[in-house]
Amino acid sequence: MDALTQEQLVDLEDAIVEQLDALLHRKNIDGTLERMLREMGLDDLIAEFEGAKKPLSTWADGDVLVLGAKPSMVENLRSVGKSLGISKGRFEFVEYDDVTNYGFRKLSYSSKYCAVLAGAHPHMARDIDGASSVITHLEGNRDEFPETVRLTAGGQLSVTKTNFKQALEDLIARGVIETDCMAA
C-alpha cells in the first residue's frame, strides 16, 4: 500500500473507529479481548481496568512448551528454533495424545517456561479447572501461566514450520523469548 494522503488517513481512522467498537464488544463477549490486545501490542491497557490480572513475569531465557506438534516434525521445529538463536534444548514438545494427561498444574507460576505455543490438541486435559479447553485455561489465567500463542494454519490450530517460526520471531521481537549464544 502506498502512503495515504492526509484526507485518506482521516477517512481510514474514521472507518477503523466505527468498526472497532463492534469488534471490542464481540471480543469481550467471546473471551478473546485480552488476546487481541496482546496481539496488537496493547495488553498493558487491560491492566488499567479493575479486576485485570497482571501477566505472569517469566524469564526470557526460559523454555518453550509446544503443544500438539507431530513427532515427525519435532527435529525440524528444533532446527527452526536453532536458526533463530534458541538452543534445541529449550523446547519441550507434548504430542497431541499426551496433552490430555499433561499436568498443567506444573506450569502454574513456573519460572521454567517463558511461552507456550499451542497447535491442535484435545480440548480436555488434567488440571484445567473446568475450562472449555487448555488454551482457554492458559489464556484466561495470564497471572498464573506463561504467554500462550495459538498456532493456526487455514483457520485451524496446527503446528507448521511457518507459523512456528513466525510465533518465535514475534516473541523474540517483543522480548518474551531471548536468544542464547549456545544456539549458534
Image (tube, grey):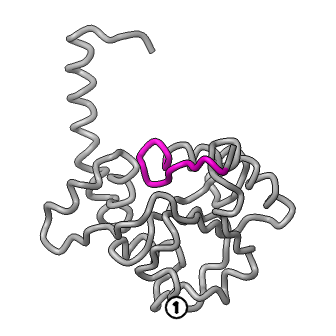
Q: Name the side, left or right, on which 23 lies relative to 183.
A: left
Q: How far across and how far down the image is residue 112, in percent?
A: 51, 73
Q: Residues within 10 Å of mark 1 (few under 14, many from 20)?
A: some
Which quarter of the picture shows residue 12? top left
Residue in the picture at 45% in, 74% down? 111
Q: Circle 1 is placed at which residue position?
A: 127
Q: Amino acid at mark 1?
A: Asp
Q: What is the magenta range?
A: 171-182
Where residue 16 sits, quadrant-wise, is top left
- Residue 108 appears at what percent x and percent y? 44, 82
Q: Is residue 59 left or right of residue 16?
A: right
Is residue 3 rendered magenta in the image? no
Q: Position of residue 119 (x, y in %)?
A: 65, 63
Image height check: is 70 above or below 15?
below
Residue 70 horizontal side relative to residue 120, left or right = right
The residue under the point 21% across, 70% down is: 52
Residue 28: quadrant of the picture: bottom left
Residue that lies at the very extreme toward the right in this rendered image:
72
Rendered-image quadrant of the C terminus: top right
Position of the N terminus, as image quadrant, is: top left
The residue furthest front is 181
Q: Nearer the viewer, residue 91 or 26?
A: 91
Q: Nearer the viewer, residue 168 or 183?
A: 183
| Residue that appears at 74% across and 54% down | 77
